[in-house]
Amino acid sequence: VQLQAYGGGLVQAGGSLRLSCANSGRTNYAMGWFRQAPGKQREFVAGITYNWGTTVYADSVKGRFIISRDKAKRMMYLQMNSLKAEDTAVYYCSTRNGDIATKTSEWHYWGQGTLVTVSS
């Protein structure tokens, strides 16, 4: 499994940004987005099941972020709206051989991160 995340950048608070994740390898049951802010542990942001499109969100992003996937293109996206300074982090995409899990340690494959900086 090879994952590559991109689309990060600098955005003002209240703005929007869309992250993309390309999966060039075998697709697994669930895909997800995580983030790691400076000095903090990596945390779950959102997850989606590859076949059914079932979604799970962290409370901190619920109502602002939307996760989606395009099966034909083997892509996953994270639409981030109403961004806040506390959303600043390196965002990672991941996939696992099982249902969506919110514990970082339960995910199996990782791509490199993409930095999102939200200026207040």
Image (tube, rainbow, N blue to C red):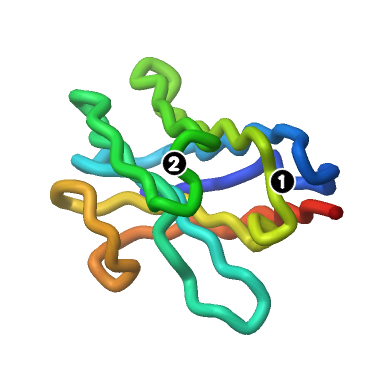
Q: Is residue 58 left or right of residue 49?
A: right
Q: Nearer the viewer, residue 55 or 31?
A: 55
Residue positioned 67% across, 61% down in the render: 86
The disc at residue 8 is: 1
Q: Amino acid at mark 2?
A: Lys
**Quadrant housing the C terminus:** bottom right
Circle 1 — which element?
loop
What amino acid type is highlighted by mark number 1? Gly
Sequence-first tag of 2 and 1: 1
Give coordinates of residue 29: x percent, y percent: 19, 40
CA gap between label 2 and label 1 equals 20 Å
- Most extreme residue toward the left is 98
Q: Secondary structure at mark 2?
A: loop
Tell me the crowding category of disc 2: few under 14, some 14 to 19, or many 20 or more residues within 10 angstroms, Cα based.
few
Q: Residue at label 2? A: 62
| In the image: residue 24, left or right of residue 78 | left
Work out whether residue 53 or residue 83 is closer to the camera in this orientation and state it.
Answer: 83
65 relative to 49 in the view: left or right: right
Residue 105 image offset from top left, x and y in percent? 29, 72
Q: Nearer the viewer, mark 2 or mark 1?
A: 2
